[in-house]
Amino acid sequence: MRTAIIADDHDVVRHGLAAVLAEIDDVELVAQAANGIEAISLVKQHHPTLLLLDAAMPMARGIEVFSEARRWSPDTRIALVTGFTSTGLLTDWMAAGVDGLFLKSCAPDEMKTGFEAILSGGNYIAEEIIRMIAEKSDRPELTAREREVLALIAAGNMNAAIATRLSISAKTVEKHRASLMAKVGAHSISELLVYALREGLLDEHRQL
């Protein structure tokens, strides 16, 4: 009997994923976790065949759970099921070696097909994610410093605080802010925040 664990801090998501797993033969859902620490503990206890993992949960981020799951149960197949649509974040997960990538908006039939493939030792990337990554060239390229400044702006920091945090001048922060707004086509801080949310740059615990 193959086993599975679901790790997501939203009840409705766990319920939906459990329903998909129930349609797959010879798979038993042995546990569910609502936070990252619980997820790590359950993986260490059960060594499941499959872990369905959210990218952002309280107490430990998805990438931390992923790393610990790989450490304690290296044979566990891990599929990310996320609300993030940032191609940068999704490609980072691909580079990390996740076995599957799904959006929470994926149809149950596609999830079932993908989970079956992963349980059988294969890999699966949702069609919508493949499409988004194929269109990645249309996204503006931000420097590492611009991404840092954007993240701090999204966290509510003013120029002076950002300057102190990054050990640069307030004038340099203002230049980065102007460059960011030009690159992403934003005309206000609120539009910058929308971009930061879409690209996964806000605090992960505040996102889907």
Image (spheres, rainbow, N blue to C red):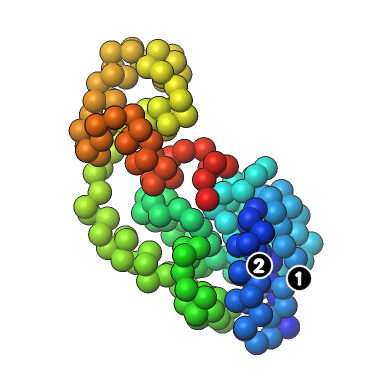
Q: Position of residue 117 (x, y in %)?
A: 51, 80
Foreground pick, 15 / 56: 15
Residue corresponding to mark 1: 30
Q: Position of residue 199 (x, y in %)?
A: 38, 45
Residue 113 to residue 17: above or below: below
Q: Is residue 7 visible?
A: no
Q: Position of residue 17 (x, y in %)?
A: 61, 69
* Residue at x 23% of width, y 29% of height: 179
Q: Position of residue 190 (x, y in %)?
A: 35, 33
The answer to the question of whether label 2 and label 1 lie on touching residues, with beta carbons closer than 8 A, is no
Foreground pick, 94 / 28: 28
Task: Locate the N terminus by quadrant.
Answer: bottom right
Q: Is residue 204 visible?
A: yes
2 or 1: tag closer to the N-terminus: 2
Say which element carries label 2: helix
Residue corresponding to mark 2: 15
Foreground pick, 14 / 55: 14
Residue 154 to residue 105: above or below: above
Query: What amino acid does circle 1 point to?
Result: Val
Residue 197 relative to residue 104: left or right: left
Disc marking residue 146: none
